Amino acid sequence: MVQTNGHADPEALIRLDGLKKHYPVLKGIVFQKTVGVVKAVDGVSFSIPEGQTYSLVGESGCGKTTTSRQILMVEPPTEGEIYYQGTAMNKFTSEQRKDFHSSVQAVFQDPWSSLNPRMRVDAIVSEPLITHQNLTKEEVKKQVGELLEVVGLHAFHADRYPHEFSGGQRQRIAIARALSTRPKLMVLDEPVSALDVSIRAQILNLLKELQQTYNLSYLLIAHNLATVRYMSHRVGVMYLGKIIEEANPQDLFGNPLHPYTKALISASLPAHPNLQREEIVLTGEVPSPLNPPDGCTFHPRCPVAFEPCNTDIPVMQEVTPGHIVNCHLFTGAEATSSAAAAS
Amino acid sequence: MQEDPVLKVEDLRTHFFTRSGVVKAVDGISFEVGRGETLGIVGESGSGKSMTAWSILGLVPQPAGKIVGGKIMYLGEDLLQKDESEMREIRGKGICMVMQDPLTSLNPVFTIGNQLIESLKMDNKDSKPTLIQKATQLLANVRIPAPESRLSVFPHQMSGGMRQRVVGAIAMARSPNVLIADEPTTSLDATIQLQYLQLLKEIQAETGAAILFITHDFGVVARMCDRVAVMYAGKIVEQASVLELFDNPQHPYTEALLKSVPDLNEDVDFLPSIEGQPPTLDDLPEGCSFAPRCPYAFDKCNVYPGESSVGEDHVASCWRLDGAN
Amino acid sequence: MATADTVLAQPSGTSSIWKKIQDLRLPWFPIAILSIIVFLAIFAPLVAPADPKKNDILQRLNPPFQTTENLLGTDGLGKDVLSRLIFGARTIMKVTLPSMVVAILVGTTVGLVAGYAGKWVDSLLMRITDAVMGFPSILVALLIVSLVGTGLVPVLIAVTATTWARFARMIRGEVLSNRDRDFVTLARISGVSPAMIIWRHLFPNVVNTLMVITSITVGQVILLVASLSFLGLGLKPGEPAWGVMVAEGRNYINGNGWWLSLFPGIIITVVVMAFNLLGDWLRDFLDPKLRRSR
């Protein structure tokens, strides 16, 4: 089987290569000593092409949010590179850095804390715009009005305050703000989890339309697998700071390879009472990234762990075109028989 | 002959009297749950599902809130006729509740063991060593590994999933007849949620408790519930067995809600959504509260429809079901 | 395109000016009190019945409400209490207010910068703040007076120097709790400069705390000026200042001069309360949630 280290497509809008983010654990009050390392992100590589959605799924502590914060330049990586339009981000000139900030925006999970309660909607929506461009008041007002209409609100909402809106509407305001600088990439961190069920479809549909209209790329972080399937072109499953499987949604959900992916899918509750899935219940808790297990970090909870799993770290393999997985079941001699069993 | 339901709510009304008017948080709902049965109450914000739970426990926030009508029959007796000391007897022993956030359900300054024993002490006059043993057993019942060592642990030292199980243990400590679960798994990871729900089912099988499961997640409903009541703006708009609800939803809200949830096993280009947003309870329209968002609304909808029986054990409130339009 | 229902109807037309003023629900009591104080400060020589510094031993310790000449009585050296109260308003304007304003400006800036910048900047600024807070104000005043001499300006400096620190500390605390809120992170992601983030996002959200601390501090500053003057470190003896009057009156509380501490005490209380109420109103006024919709 062919070894790959992620889809290092140099043409992609955003490309991550071996990204690591380690947080030192310090002890002591005056003189601090490093007693451990939290490997929140431990070697992540993937790429997002223009106009497409790449989703990161995984449970709490897997590192998906930390990865997104690296991409947004909120924190610098410990190791590895992130390339934006072919240029390494840590080599940005200040011009490029400024341009980056207007090209990459974000929408977060909580519509209540995403908007400054003391700012009017027009100020909120136009802030990225006025930071990057010199426009007259009339031009700003016009653009704000258009943005609000595009996200399904009305121009006269501009002089209201956030608390006058419902959760779904606030999320629309957040999206309007993110769109204001005509970005190329939007990081969507659980964009609908905090919204009522009947509103979620509205917002997801809006995001899909916007993607088509403006050729936007999305990095979607979500725990709801059905949402991920609806929105994504490509999905990466993370566990303890690493991507353990990556494929397009049809292949990933139709033919999951990694035992963790299978467990995750089975944990997704059924869409109908008669569709009870075979439930793979993992034993134990999600281990802390402070003290990850040796070898394959998933092995203590893995229902099919075998000999190399507790000592050797598996390498990414491309099992079928476009479907890569990080698991000993697919390395070496095991690979052929497992691949046959999986199909 | 079916035995009597453990909990039977009849035409419950809980209203809030505020400066801007009366908010009818719960406006005439009726349902029942039997031994060993799980009834799901599905709704979104403002539907009144949580307030229903508080009303049953007699913990409606006062002075603004008041139960203004109806009956809550628990084991044949009307809870609304009981005074506070009688309700205190029932709370925690007969009817128990677990809530969404285990961090706020547990007292951060007391150990797990301490809180379990406090709960046990209410029914048991046992000596300390016996109580400790019982507490350990309770933790083992909720599948917490090495339970003896967990008694001296503080809530913040445990993971979310464990905490939720401890809350469950405390709730089950007194073998309640009714367990009200208000979105207990919303903040848990998927794999942990599954463990927890399975655990809940096992406990129910062992103790025969009736479970009232409040949720907004149809996946949970499909997994856990025998019967379902769908709430909207303070009223139950449809009630049926779980299979009936999924296969044959009659109320436009239920139908639209089910269709708007994406499916893990299918690819669709477009997700049908419901227009507008859930109503604010102080500004309800005349007549059917769902009408402003309903694709089938017509002129009759400005009067609230009565309940129509749609099949065996399946009722819904919609004018479309009331004979010819 | 999916449309969302409108939450509120379209804004209505303009209403009359009077209605707008009514809507503001101005706090009339504090405004009245503070206007009176300002008025007295400006027009003191015209309003006061007597010279506040003129001693008249023969008239000492006259009780209040006996004559129209000394409506509120006289003090231990025969000075007219009412006139001193009126001129005391000037001291407030000359000393208390300016030192408060400077303390607020300095303290808030330090707090905002320390809270947002974090790391060594925060550590450095907070060590300085802690050091200043650790010194009793009297000592600081002594230090300043020994460098600059006595008088109004040193008192001003001394008061400012000891008061700014508490603002810095509390504002920094507020900034820390607001700094990781999503909308701040989103502003950073959008490339907004730190100065703008502090100004647009952090400052408006710490204003509440600022109001509260200011209200609490006004009374303390008045008394601080009094203690400093009492020790001879500030105003010359005989200068009319409410705090000084309270302090001077303490010898006479139990008997032949009960009114000497009482009246200035009352006026201090009323002024502090006025600031409190004004602060409350301002806090509500700035809170978008509490504004009536237009």
Image (cartoon, coloured by chain):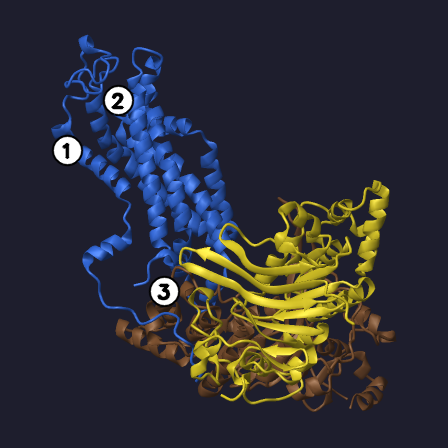
Chain colours: A brown, B yellow, C blue
Q: Are marks 1 and 3 in contact (CB under 8 Å)?
A: no
Helix, strand or loop at mark 3: loop
For residue B160, side relative to residue A217 (left or right): right
For the image, the number of numbered tags is: 3
Which quarter of the image is occupied by the N terminus of chain B?
A: bottom right
Q: Of the residues shown, which amino acid type is indicated by label 3? A: Arg
The CA distance from mark 1 to mark 3 is 43 Å
Residue C105 quadrant:
top left
Q: Residue placed at 68% from the left, 61% from the top?
A: B180
Residue sitting nearer the eye, A105 or A57:
A57
Chain containing mark 3? A
Query: For mark 3, what is the residue?
Result: A120
Q: Residue placed at 66% from the left, 70% from the top?
A: B40
Q: Residue placed at 46% from the left, 78% from the top?
A: B291
Q: Which mark is residue C43?
A: 1
Q: Position of residue A166 (x, y in %)?
A: 45, 68
Residue A155 quadrant:
bottom left
